[in-house]
Image (cartoon, rainbow, N blue to C red):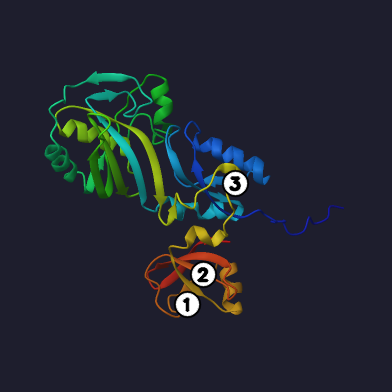
Amino acid sequence: MATSAGPRRDDGPHGVLVVDKQAGWTSHDVVAKCRGIFGTRKIGHAGTLDPSATGVLVLGVGRATRLLRFVTELPKSYLGEIVFGAETSTLDADGEICARHDMSGLQASAVLAAARQFVGSIKQVPPMVSAVKVDGKRLYALAREGKVVERRARAVFVYRFALEPLAAESGVWRCEVDCSSGTYIRSLAADLGAALGGGAYLRALRRVAVGDFTVEQAQSVENALLLPVSAAVAHLDYRIVSDEVAVRVGHGQVFDDDVFGDPVAGLCAVKRTDGSLLAVYAPNRNQLKPLVVL
């Protein structure tokens, strides 16, 4: 007679990794390496970085993979260099130069004035070499087949777009960008070049922050420290509940909107009295409904 296997073990590891991705690695390469280091396949990342880009890549391990959606939505900060006078097939230094423009007379005042039109809410067309899906297929896969398809412009938000010329190299400007999730910095560079009557491409991109996860705390894949699962939602409002309510939260119960005490206006992390994370809830009409229950 068959016997019950009992409750499924969930021993871990669980937590958040903040990796400083090196150039030449894909985001999937980092995930694969971490799977070997931590001995689990349950690892994912929150927001792809191009192979040539470096900097902050946030990963979730174990239960934290279920919270990566809340990290992906965080604003990002980047450093990079914009090369004026040429366009490439990928909008960055990885592609082949497909057009050249004489922009030797480019004035600093014109660059700064043009950059201002890209601050605030703007529309961007995703590059062909990107992970966006069109009719169920990644754009980069279509690009490898030599195909170019129509892409719908998407609304993004640029909080800051600061530029300064590099003294060592004419026609190259250093840029700093604070932006919403989903913003393509190479599209920003290409669009700026077009706005100035020529062309441009991006090089040396480095992501320096994802929300409050900064490059200063990021480490190499081999040395990355496993942060608590709750680090993935540290930016959210939170409520600490009694042991009795914690049991009901653990069962994914829907609550009246006053059960956690103070009204909940947005996403809310729910914790036990010992500080451990139980779930993430969101208001829905006059109720609180679970989005993720750990």
Q: Name the residue under label 2.
A: 270
Q: Is residue 119 left or right of residue 136?
A: left
Q: How crowded is mark 2: few (under 14 residues within 10 Å), some or many (20 or more)?
A: many
Percent position of residue 274, x then y: 60, 74
Real-space Cα distance between discs 2 and 3? 30 Å
What residue lies at 14% left-to-right and 31% top-to-bottom? Answer: 106
Quarter holding residue 288:
bottom left
Q: Residues within 10 Å of mark 3 (few under 14, many from 20)?
A: few
What residue lies at 57% left-to-right and 57% top-to-bottom? Answer: 227
**Quadrant housing the C terminus:** bottom right
Q: Are marks 2 and 1 in contact (CB under 8 Å)?
A: yes
Q: Name the residue under label 3.
A: 223
- The relative height of residue 168 versus residue 262 in the rendered view (above or below) is above
Circle 3 SS class: helix
Q: Name the residue under label 1.
A: 260
Q: Is residue 173 left or right of residue 244?
A: left
